[in-house]
Amino acid sequence: MGKVFRKSEVGAGKGVIFLAIVLLIVLIALVWKISSRAAPTIQVQGEVKGLGMSTPVTFEVHDAGHHLKQIQVEVLQGGQTFEVLDSKLPTPSWWKFWSRAGSKQATLTARAGRREIPNLQEGRATLVIAANNDSWGRFFRGGRAEIRQDLPVRFMPPQVEVLTSQHYINQGGCDMVLFKVSPGTVESGVQVGKYFFPSWPVKESMPETRMCVFAYSWEVDPKTPARIVARDDAGNETLANFNYEVFPKKFREDTFDLTDEFMQRIVPPIMSQTPEIRDEGSLEKNFLLINGPLRQMDAQKLVAFSQKTAPHFTWTQPFVQLGNSKVEAAFADSRTYNYNGQTIDHQTHLGFDLAVTQHTPVVAANDGIVVHAGWLGIYGNAVVIDHGCGLQSLYGHLSSVDVKEGENVKRGQIIGHSGQTGLAGGDHLHFSMLLDGIPVNPVEWWDAHWIHDRIEAKLQ
């Protein structure tokens, strides 16, 4: 007869097997811990070009297989090591290999400069960012990643010399200032409230002589100060004043009485082209989404288009207005929208509405490069042309678009035909001038005398 196993013996056997499996798993975990040489990854956000009085250094550390144990930032100079950051992170016990405690990713910002390191000297220094994980490789120190950057060290901010004497700006309009910056300056321009207008070299051979077309946006308080801002590769910043006078302007007010017929005509076509706008099932609610949130989305796109600008003017003549056109709405008209006897919205019209006849040919206002050709929210079929140094023109509500993105166009060249696509009550051209994506008054750019006094004479 075969041997009969008691229940206790069977249980003991299973216990031994279970214990053996646990020990095997622990052994595998130990071997993996000891043998692993995987290191974290470090990625610096943005570009650190130098160290100044207090330069921010933002970076992300990530580890796919282990927990982060220690993150350090140091500056090395003249045989000395200056500690800027030493962050020790909690890690789970070695035997809790299943634990999710601890961190596998961290985003940190350290500041390095004279304020944090009083003994730091101008010249050059090495920035070191290091991270260790909790693996047992490399003699129990863990996997280690390290980034080193040799950087200039500067404490003196850039110097600015203003070259143009007096500047006159209409609210909603532009002017141009010329100035020189000291070597090492990597960014400069004019700050007006929340708006920053970057400068551009007057000539490639004169990179430190800068020109900056700036604006006082229609909604900016004329008392808001304008200042030249210059930053160097170490993050040092200079603010410089210059002489200017702002002329306040009162813009026209207008009222629109909305009808069901109008909204039935314009709302569904725009909604069909705008999947990011959720249909609220109501003409009035959908109109408000188009007139408000979609209008803001379009404004953000115009700012994005400005990043595609050429680093020099592409034009030499004043801009042209649509020929024989009647002005139906002007720049910065304040509009009140009424529906069923009640006010439901307020918006500002940031361009000129120009009408001739149906499907009249629309021409490029000046030489440039097409940066957008196609549907553009409330503007319907639209073309945006870049004229260099942040200056662009917008042509909206077109019935047809006859150019494509990337195409070079000439002043007076037909780029499309007028229409009533988008948020338009009838066939016309919506024309806007944009500076760094901010709408400005086109009247100045149509004026040969203004072009000469504000731009050409200064460049000469």
Image (cartoon, helix red, strand yellow):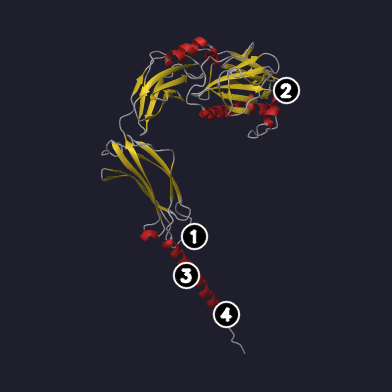
SS at mark 4 in the image: helix
Q: Are marks 4 and 3 in contact (CB under 8 Å)?
A: no
| Amino acid type, residue under disc 1 in the picture | Trp
Q: Which residue is at 42% across, 55% downward?
A: 91
The dot on residue 98 is: 1
The dot on residue 7 is: 4
| Mark 4 Cα shell of 10 Å, populated few (<14), some (14-19), many (≥20) | few
Residue 246 visible, this angle: no
Looking at the rendered image, the quarter that the C terminus falls into is: top left
| Mark 1 Cα shell of 10 Å, populated few (<14), some (14-19), many (≥20) | few
The dot on residue 23 is: 3
| Mark 3 Cα shell of 10 Å, populated few (<14), some (14-19), many (≥20) | few
Residue 441, position in %: x, y?
A: 54, 16
Give the camera-side residue of 181 and 410.
410
Q: Earlier in the sequence, mark 4 or mark 3?
A: 4
Q: Can you tell which of label 2 and label 3 is closer to the viewer?
A: 3
- Pointer 2 residue: 260
Residue 276 visible, this angle: yes
Does 324 sit above or below residue 404? above
Does 33 sit above or below residue 63? below
| Amino acid type, residue under disc 2 in the picture | Asp
Q: Give the alpha-carbon distance from disc 2 to disc 1, as whole Å.
A: 63 Å
Q: Earlier in the sequence, mark 2 or mark 3?
A: 3
Q: Earlier in the sequence, mark 1 or mark 3?
A: 3
Give the camera-side residue of 124 and 430.
124
Q: Give the alpha-carbon distance from disc 4 to disc 3, as whole Å.
A: 24 Å
SS at mark 2 in the image: helix
| Amino acid type, residue under disc 3 in the picture | Leu
Q: Give the alpha-carbon distance from disc 4 to disc 1, as whole Å.
A: 33 Å
Residue 347, position in %: x, y?
A: 59, 21
Looking at the rendered image, the quarter that the N terminus falls into is: bottom right
Residue 284, position in %: x, y?
A: 68, 26
